[in-house]
Image: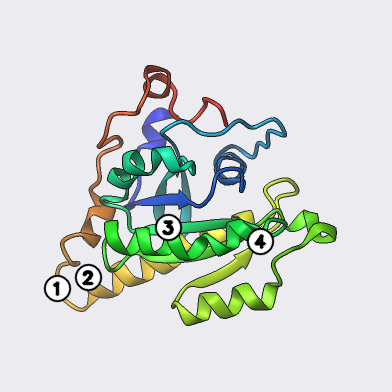
Amino acid sequence: MRGKDDEYDYLFKIVLIGDSGVGKSNLLSRFTRNEFNLESKSTIGVEFATRSIQVDNKTVKAQIWDTAGQERYRAITSAYYRGAVGALLVYDIAKYLTYENAERWLKELQDHADANIVIMLVGNKSDLRHLRAVPTDEAKSFAEKNGLSFIETSALDSTNVETAFHNILAEIYRIVSQRQLAGGQPEAEFSHGTTIEPIKVLPTHQEGRQAPCCQNI
């Protein structure tokens, strides 16, 4: 089984960004292991997990990095944007401040990530519709204005989690394969999506190195 898991046509690094507590870790665990932890603790530093999907009869392996949302970790996590070809910018639909801060996270992406990175704005915790503080139309307009795709999800009840990851991976695959069909090599940074090493930067603590996808999810 281990050997089969290592077989893929494309390997894309995706980063999850956004404020602490918006549900990034649970989005990761829901997509990669179909798990949800109600008592999820804040991520320390960076963790990652992988999952492969099929796009156009090709095996696309997603290597998804969960970056800590706390201010004090921002200097650490900025290094992890390197080599990323996709980003899910997550906010909590029940906490308006997390949505307001999406603009700052977007700027951080623009400052540290590759210019060609594919970005999806994700309004998480859609199950809390009775506590909604961020109107869907407002978030959709923000996404359109900034050239982002947009979706609302719930890691708790699984709503749109598969769709969000599948959509962004399919979009990245489409861009990469179109460049290859055009006869040229993919642009230098973007081509890292097919060649990135499993771990480029050492985790911030020893536990994470032993089980980066399984601690404090």
Q: Which type of secondary structure does the marked residue at label 1 adopt? A: loop
Please give the residue where the numbered disc 4 appears in the rendered image.
Answer: 96
User: Which numbered tag is attached to residue 180?
Assistant: 2
Image location of residue 116, percent across then percent down: 29, 68
Please give the residue where the numbered disc 1 appears in the rendered image.
Answer: 184
Please give the residue where the numbered disc 3 appears in the rendered image.
Answer: 87
Q: Which type of secondary structure does the marked residue at label 3 adopt? A: strand
Amino acid type of the residue tagged 2 in the rendering: Gln
Above or below residue 194? Residue 209 is above
**Closest to the observer, 40 or 61:** 40
Query: Residue at point 42% right, 38% down?
Result: 72
Image location of residue 13, percent across then percent down: 35, 50
Query: Residue at point 23% right, 53% down?
Result: 192
Above or below residue 182? Residue 210 is above
Q: Which type of secondary structure does the marked residue at label 2 adopt? A: helix
Q: CA distance from mark 3 to mark 2?
A: 22 Å
